[in-house]
Amino acid sequence: MALSSDLARLVSTTTKTPPQWRGITPRWLLSLLPYIQLNAATYRVNRVESDPNVMAGHDEGVIIPDAMVGLEEIPQEYTLSPIDAALRIHTRVMDLYNDPYEQVYLQATTVIQVMKELQEDQVINSPTFGLLNSVADGMKIDSETGPPTPNDFDNLISLVWNRPAFFVANPKTIARFGQECTKRGVCIGAVEMLGSPFQTWRGIPIVPSNKVHIDDKGNTNILLLRVGAENQGVVGLMPKTVKNEIMPGISMRLNGIDDTNLANYMISLYHSVAVHTEEALGVMNIKL
């Protein structure tokens, strides 16, 4: 009688994976944004309210006006926004079940992945600082026919023409744009960034994010950003350091062990996004 596989498994060791969460996305927007580290929780953007007076080609003796730069009396301020999660693990689990994986680390890693997915969603959709709610009225346009076409992308570039960095759109929107280009016999470019290929239009990468939502009627948006503080563009905000930091901008602290031997951990992520000048961000409303 030969030893069966079922019996052999009883005395063998299985190779196990850490938890696999299917909701993880590349979160390219978070990776492509340049970040400013704040010593305190607030970032103030001082904008020029009026252009300074300068002259050229004038005659001798002409009085040159003062070139004072006028600033907004009430500048816009961005405060770091928290994303929190409470993690509870029984001490018995931590004592007895840490081989091959340390349980607190595994749980915290998965929780942080969920928090960072919410972070990207907040960067786009937050009612207080999200990009879609930070677009100036003069930087909003509608598509010409509904679905995104090459003309529509060109119209959006005409708004953010000064050093545009990348578009952001839902993957389904990008696919529909590709179909519209194919209908017209137009080729879409490509570029590799962050180890992955991205489609481009006029040399500008089109970054997919499922956090740019599509409603039940097919309405959605395409964003175009100029980025970087040196370009007066869009930047991400994060704390320079936090207590009990386990990752940049993320803290994890033990809040004690209760009478039932449950260890209580609080995981906190602090972030925001700022737009330095209004022409750094444009949006196009489309219908798929």
Image (tube, rainbow, N blue to C red):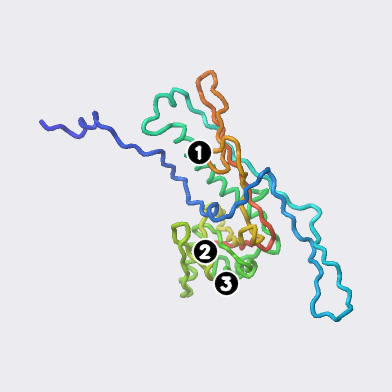
Percent coordinates x, y for residue 122 in the rendering = 60, 48
Query: Which residue corresponds to mark 1?
Result: 111
Return the residue at label 3.
Answer: 151
Place of residue 24 in the rendered image (x, y in percent of width and height, measured from the top left): 47, 46
- Tell me the residue that label 2 is attached to: 205
Which of 211/31 is in front? Answer: 31
Q: Secondary structure at mark 1?
A: helix
Eye-nearest disc, 2 or 3: 2
Q: Amino acid at mark 1?
A: Val
In front of the other: 141 or 118:
118
Mark 2 and mark 3 lie on one chain; the one further toward the N terminus is 3
Which residue occupies 80% across, 66% down? Answer: 52
Q: CA distance from mark 1 to mark 2?
A: 30 Å
Crowd class of label 3 (few under 14; some 14 to 19; many from 20; radius 10 Å):
few
How would you rate the neighbour count of disc 1 (Cα within 10 Å): few for under 14, some for 14-19, many for 20 or more?
A: some
The quarter of the image holding the N terminus is top left
Check residue 248 in the rendering and tell me which mark sits there, or answer none: none
The answer to whether marks 1 and 2 mark residues whose Cβ atoms lie closer than 8 Å is no
How many numbered discs sit on the rendered protein?
3
Does 43 appear above or below 256? below
Q: Amino acid at mark 2?
A: Pro
Q: Position of residue 94 (x, y in %)?
A: 44, 26
Q: Sequence order check: which comes first, mark 1 or mark 2? A: 1
